[in-house]
Amino acid sequence: MRAGIYVHIPFCPGKCRYCSFNSVPYDDQAAKLYVDALVREIETCPVDVEPSIIYIGGGTPTTLPADGLASVIGAINGRFGLWNEPTGHKSGDIVPPEFTIEANPGTVSGLDVKALTALGVNRVSLGAQSFSPSELAMLGRLHGPADVAHAAGTLRRGGITNISLDLIYSLPGQDMRSWKESLAQTVDLNPEHISMYDLTLEEGTPLYSEVRAGRLVMPPEPVQVEMYLCAVDFLETAGYRRYEISNFARPGFACRHNINYWDCGEYLGFGAGAHSYAGGRRTKNIDGITYYTAAAGAGGPSLAESEELSPGDMEREFIMLGLRKAAGLEFAEFRRRFGHDLAESRREAIARLEGAGLVETSGGRLRLTMSGVLVSNAVIRELF
Ligand code: SF4
């Protein structure tokens, strides 16, 4: 079975003020125990897969010392083998899978990038988020704008030829001028891939409390929409193709890890809170880092949740994830998977949405128009 592999490293240099991810500030002892548990979970994985994509995310995986990262990658290689993917072009050709690691711009200067590439890493996703010093400070990021350029240079010199930068918009106090400036500085660094997300205020975070208390003010909704549309226009003019609602890439550099997810492909997740999806079953590991470490480190089960998806669940997931892609979902693939015709079973909803200019059908596919992208959740609900 071919599948993606995701590994979660939950440590970060600090905690950003908007962060509700499963992450904690780095601690040497906790990290050592965590790596041991993770290696054990990987080595004892009962499922055999041929890894088509590897993604080490977090957290900030690059907070781990080099030997910790090498142990994790060594465990993946030992259990699954990283170099088995045939290209399909010439018999016997071998190409490595896309192998991404997430990094914080402030953690790249201490990295031995050549050692990472020797271990198979060929793509780095950098959390730039903004190029405004005041916005970065408000977000609680520990890096400044210059660190992003510095990190990108270090990665290039170390042999990384596929860099992705993440940006966040709709920030409190952000205006069109500062957003355009962040976009321009991003493009100046010439990354192969760019992701941009609007800020989601998560309850329990310091930023949420400050916005609720009125000390920080989010841009009004029409400005948030203008920021999105301006970014699409700017990035497409700069040669990036929007291949998903929030993701842009130079030709040939769309992220295969993301695409596997939106195509409802199978993947195995390792580490605290990691999700897996295989054989129609979705599972989730224990979230709590200490609990996960104790359970997996003792060789015990690390699963917290396991759910068999019904055919209806799988259909809805296929629609929801497929419509996130700019290319949309393919009617023939839907029929192949579910044995009936989406255009028939949702005929009225599709006609209504098409009439409202929110979706379009052509070339055997159903996709969101740009007006549909702006209200994507509502459109997708109509098709459920
Ligand atoms: S770097 Fe990412 S995961 Fe870590 S604290 Fe900041 S937002 Fe959270």
Image (cartoon, helix red, strand yellow):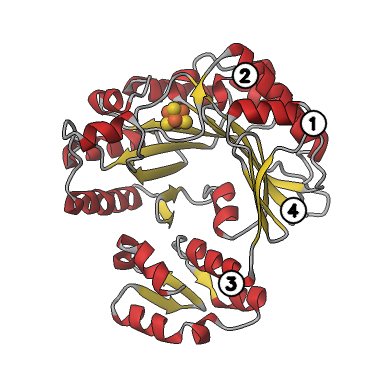
- Amino acid type at circle 3 is Gly
Q: Nearer the viewer, mark 4 or mark 3?
A: 3
Q: Is residue 33 left or right of residue 359?
A: right
Q: Position of residue 33 (x, y in %)?
A: 68, 19
Q: Which comes sooner in the sequence, label 2 or label 3?
A: 2
- Please give the name of the residue rendered at 42% of the width and 24% of the height, measured from the top-left corner: 15
Residue 299: image tag: 1
State which quadrant residue 214 falls in: top left
State the residue position of label 4. 2
- Answer few, some or many: residues within 10 Å of disc 1's Cα (few below 14, many 20 plus, some between 14 and 19): some
For ligand 1, give the image quadrant.
top left
Q: Is disc 1 placed on a helix, strand or loop?
A: loop
| Quarter of the picture holding the N terminus | bottom right
Residue type, label 4: Arg
Q: Nearer the viewer, mark 1 or mark 2?
A: 1
Give residue 184's position: percent from left, percent from top. Answer: 28, 37
Between 311 and 48, the residue placed more toward the observer is 311
First in sequence, mark 1 or 3: give its number: 1
Badge 4 or badge 3: first in the primary sequence: 4
- In the picture of the structure, the residue carrying the numbered disc 2 is 31
Disc 3, SS: helix
Q: Is residue 328 left or right of residue 129?
A: right
What residue sits right under mark 3 in the picture? 312
